[in-house]
Amino acid sequence: MREMLKSKIHKAVVTSSNPGYEGSIGIDENLMKKVDILPDEKVLVISNDTGERLETYAFYEDPGSGEISINGGATRKITEGEEITILSFRYSGESLQSKKILVNDSNQFVKFY
């Protein structure tokens, strides 16, 4: 078994942060569904601005809102306004066809790639 890329949201922009929240990343529900990320699924978040990386779990923000929120302790590593990439992985004994999307600076779907 190998850990393989399952999902990728590229060039998303963090729209809000709440250090008082218990922790996680909120992602526009439409984007999560396009790349098959479920609520409470572990994700790797990478800042395209600083290179900072963190693992957390995802939850739905309102569909179509373009909202990407960073919460809890993660706000010390990635802040509002940063461009990020969100990845999820799964174990498989064979090659996978991952779902990768590009979003614009308003976090609206642009294309699969």
Image (spheres, rainbow, N blue to C red):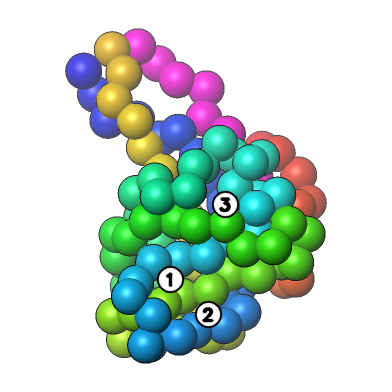
Secondary structure at badge 2 equals loop
Residue tagged by mark 1? 47
Q: Quadrant of the C terminus?
A: top right
Secondary structure at badge 1 equals strand
* Residue displayed at 39% across by 66% down: 24
Q: Amino acid at mark 2?
A: Glu
Query: With respect to residue 81, does 37 lie above or below?
Result: above
Instruction: Kindly check if marks 3 and 2 are in contact, taking CB atoms under 8 A apart as contact.
Output: no
Instruction: Kindly check if marks 1 and 3 are in contact, taking CB atoms under 8 A apart as contact.
Output: no
Q: Is residue 43 left or right of residue 98?
A: left
User: Residue 81: image x %, image y %?
Assistant: 57, 84
**What mark, if any, has residue 78 been given in the picture?**
none
The residue stretch that appears in magenta: 94-103
Name the N-terminal-most of marks 2 and 1: 1
Q: Is residue 47 left or right of residue 74?
A: right
Name the N-terminal-most of marks 3 and 2: 3
Query: With respect to residue 3, does 103 lie above or below?
Result: below
* Residue displayed at 46% across by 75% down: 70
Secondary structure at badge 3 equals strand
Q: In the rendered picture of this protein, how many numbered marks are placed on residues? A: 3
User: Residue 57: image x %, image y %?
Assistant: 37, 56
Mark 2 is surrounded, within 10 Å at the Cα level, by few (under 14), some (14 to 19) or many (20 or more) other residues, namely some
Q: Amino acid at mark 1?
A: Ser
Q: CA distance from mark 2 to mark 1?
A: 7 Å
Task: Give the quarter of the image for residue 36.
Answer: top right
Residue tagged by mark 2? 82
